[in-house]
Structure formats: structure tokens, C-alpha cells
Image (cartoon, helix red, strand yellow):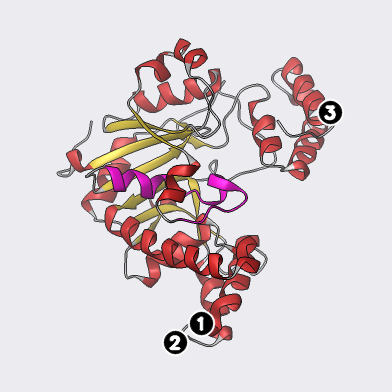
Amino acid sequence: MKNSSMANKIAVLFRTHYWSDAIEYNYQLLMRNCSFETFILFDRTNLISSSLLDQYAGFSKGSFHNHTVQDFLSLGLYMHSNGLWHCGDYPLLGFFGKTNYQYALMIEADCHVNIDLDSVISSLADSRVDLAGVHLGANDTNWYWNQQYLIWLVSNHSQQTNAPSLRDLELQTVKNGGVFFPFIWMSRSLAEAQYNLRLQQSAYVRANPSVANWYPFCEKDILESCLATGHTFRPLQELIDCTNITWQNLFYSHDGLGKSVFHPALSGIDFCKKLQKIHRFRDIMSLSSYMRQHYDAAESRHLADSIIGFCEQPMIDV
């Protein structure tokens, strides 16, 4: 049970843009492992009707904080072409803007959370940690988002006064790395600083449209913002086993999962559809190859056949 002295200032956010059997399972599991106030952070941008979703107990009874892409545009924020996947910090910023909570833990709907979440939350809140998540990409010059962020820095370096040399910026940004967003903790103070930074970045993109593709990715940008503004960061690896959280070319089915946080955890072909939606076609083919290589060891041959069949169909948008 929650025992933090700040319990009424903490919210847990279950972030999704759709609902399915797998999402319902993950939501109900989260509710069993957490006693802090929990909201469904629902992106309704492409939702035509919720009537078909009301059949799910979690969805029909959940407490919602809804948003659309237009909501963030109205706040003066630039929207990258990859939308709220790229700008994954926006839903958190919007939530803090509408509420009085001081801390929030945002968990993606494809996370299978089967740990004592209350103890993790209490530890972060009582220590006044501003940002926590799986630390990744540190000291890795090949991490894609380090490379992308460096291009962004170069593009606006001349606009900054008393800016460090580009070489110093490169060394620092590669050293910092980023924070994995499927399971992330943030304070109101950091959210306010991040919102102000995003407004500056948005204004720069509008004045310089040619740099739009390099608009900073949330997982990289939030850690840079945290460190630059003197906020505190704690790697989630210091609190829990994060072995099963970072994305791999496979997926976890719910059956037989132990006490840990697993990501992604989607049943059937939901995971494949997610990859297809964001045009991760290379990853889809990697998954197909993985399933073929491990076919004999699959717990469900029928499921394996379904995944392979989905992965190897013509790649079209869904």
C-alpha cells in the first residue's frame, strides 16, 4: 500500500490511444499492483467512437484525462510528423497543465507491470526525484537519438549566445544518453521547465522549417532538459530489474510472466500492428525472422503462425 507522505500529490498514468484484450489485461494488472490514484491518459485524436470500447471493464470504469494532437498545437507546441510517439512528453506536460499533481508516473499500455509499484513510487517521491526511467544510450555514439540530437544542436548553435563549442556539446550529449519512455516518472517542476523549452524549440522550427525533421525526440530531450535545469535524475535500474523493459525484436505474451516489468507485452498480433502503424517495417521483418528461428520452441504454434503470417503480408498502413 502507498506510504509516501505525498500520496495525494502523485498520479499514475496509463497511456494509450486504443483498447483491446491485451490492453485491458495490462490495465487490470497495473491496478492490482498500485494503490495510487490512476488515470487513463487517452489519445482521442483518431478515435471515432468509444462505444465499442465500453465493453471493457477497465475502459468503461476508468478515470480519464483525454487529449488530442490539436490540444498540444493550441498550447503553442510544434508537432513532429511522427506525432505523439516522437513527442511523448506532451501528454505528461498536458496532464500537469490541467491538474495540481506534483509527480506523475506514466506507463505505456503495452507494459506488463507485475511488481510492487507502490514502493517504487514512494521511494521516488520521498527522495524528491524529478525524473526517473531506464537510462539508455549513455556514452553510445551509435545510439540513433544521440546522433539526431547532435544534428539539432548544430542547426541552432549559431543562434545561442555564449554556447559551448560544438565539440563540447557532442561529448556532453553522447555522455548523457536518454530515458526510455514506456515507464517514466516526472515532477511538475521538470514538466514546467520542459514545456518552456519545447515552446522555444517549437518557435525555432516554425522560423526554420528546414530543421523540422530534427525536432528533438522525447527520450533524448527530457534528460537533456533535466540535467541542464538542475533537476534530479535517477536511473530506474537502481530501483528495479529493468532487463525486460527495453525493446527487443520479440514480444512477451502474458502467459507465464513473473514478477517484473515487461515491455512490450501484447497478445496475438497487437504488437505487430503497433510496429506497422509507426512504419517500423524493418523491426517487423526482424520479428518474423525471430519467430521462424524459434518456431519449435514457441509455446503456441498457432500464435507463432499468426505472427509470421501478419509480418510477411504486404506492408500497408493500418
Q: Residue lying farthest left?
A: 5
What separation in Å lies between label 1 and label 2 (alpha carbons)? 7 Å
Give the residue at mark 1: 159
Count of numbered tags = 3
159, 41: nearer the viewer = 159
| Direction from residue 204 to residue 269 in the image, left or right | right
Residues under numbered marks 2 and 3 in contact, where contact means CB atoms less than 8 Å apart: no
Query: What is the magenta range?
Result: 77-98
Relative to 44, does residue 192 appear above or below in the rendering? below
Residue depicted at x 20% and y 43%: 9
Which part of the image, by quadrant, shows the C terminus? Answer: top right
Give the residue at mark 2: 161
| Direction from residue 303 to residue 231 in the image, left or right | left
Magenta-span inclusion, residue 92: yes
Q: Residue 147 at what x, y percent from top left?
A: 64, 68
Crowd rating for badge 3 (residues with CA inside 10 Å; few <14, some 14–19, many 20+):
few
Q: As shown in the figure, which amino acid type bears the numbered disc 3? A: Gln
Which one is earlier in the sequence, the residue at label 2 or at label 3? 2
Crowd rating for badge 1 (residues with CA inside 10 Å; few <14, some 14–19, many 20+):
few
| Local SS, label 1 | helix
Q: As shown in the figure, which amino acid type bears the numbered disc 1? A: Gln
Q: Residue 196 at what x, y percent from top left?
A: 37, 63
Q: Residue 312 at what x, y percent from top left?
A: 84, 30
Residue depicted at x 66% and y 41%: 278
| Direction from residue 187 to residue 156 in the image, left or right | right
| Local SS, label 3 | loop
Residue depicted at x 39% and y 16%: 60
Give the residue at mark 3: 313
What separation in Å lies between label 2 and label 3 (alpha carbons)? 52 Å
| Direction from residue 128 to residue 60 in the image, left or right | right
